[in-house]
Image (cartoon, rainbow, N blue to C red):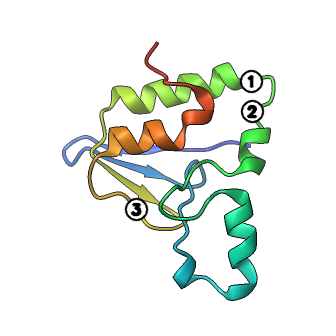
Amino acid sequence: MDEVVFFHRQSRTLILTDLIENFELHKVPNSYKLLIQLAGIADPDGKTPFDLRLTFLGRKDLARQGFKQMLAWEPDKIILAHGRWYDSNGMAQLRRAFRWLGRGDD
C-alpha cells in the first residue's frame, strides 16, 4: 500500500489520507460504531488503523522513516481524510497517533 502525505509550509499543515483515522462516533452510523471502536480509530485517540499497520510488517523501518520526515516538518495542523482533524498541537498528535512506531526522534 502506498500513502502520500502533503505538507504546506506556510501554514505548517500536514494533510494525510489513511495514516491517521479519527472518526467521531456521533457522526457515523450505529452499524459502524463498534467496528471503529475495535479498530482503535475513534476520536479522541485516532491513529493508524490496524490493517494499515499490518502492511508494514517486516518494514517498520520504512514507516519510521516516513514518520521522522513528518516530525521534521514540525506541523501545527493535521488535516485527515477520515474524521476530526487537528487544528493545533500537530507534533504531539503525530507522536500520539504513531506511538506504535516509537518516538521517531531517536
Near-viewer residue (67 or 35): 35
Q: Secondary structure at mark 3?
A: loop
What's the residue at 55%, 22% (across, down)? 65
Category of crowding for the residue at label 3, using alpha-carbon neighbours closer than 10 angstroms: few (below 14), some (14–19), many (at least 20): many
Where's residue 98, x and y in %? 54, 38
Residue occupied by mark 3? 85
Question: With 70 as the anchor, is 25 left or right in this view?
Answer: right
Asked if marks 1 and 2 touch (Cβ < 8 Å), the reply is yes
Residue 13 shown left or right of residue 41 in the figure: left
Q: Earlier in the sequence, mark 3 or mark 1?
A: 1
Kindly identify the amino acid type of the residue bearing the numbered disc 2.
Phe
Instruction: Looking at the image, tell me whether mark 2 or mark 3 is earlier in sequence order.
Output: 2
Residue 60 in the image: above or below residue 88: above
Q: Residue 18, position in %: x, y?
A: 60, 54
* Mark 1 residue element: loop
Amino acid on which the number 1 mark rests in the picture: Arg
Q: In the figure, residue 59 lies in which quadrant?
A: top right
Q: Mark 1 highlights which residue?
A: 59
User: The N terminus appears in which quarter of the rendering?
Assistant: top right
Residue labelled with disc 2: 56
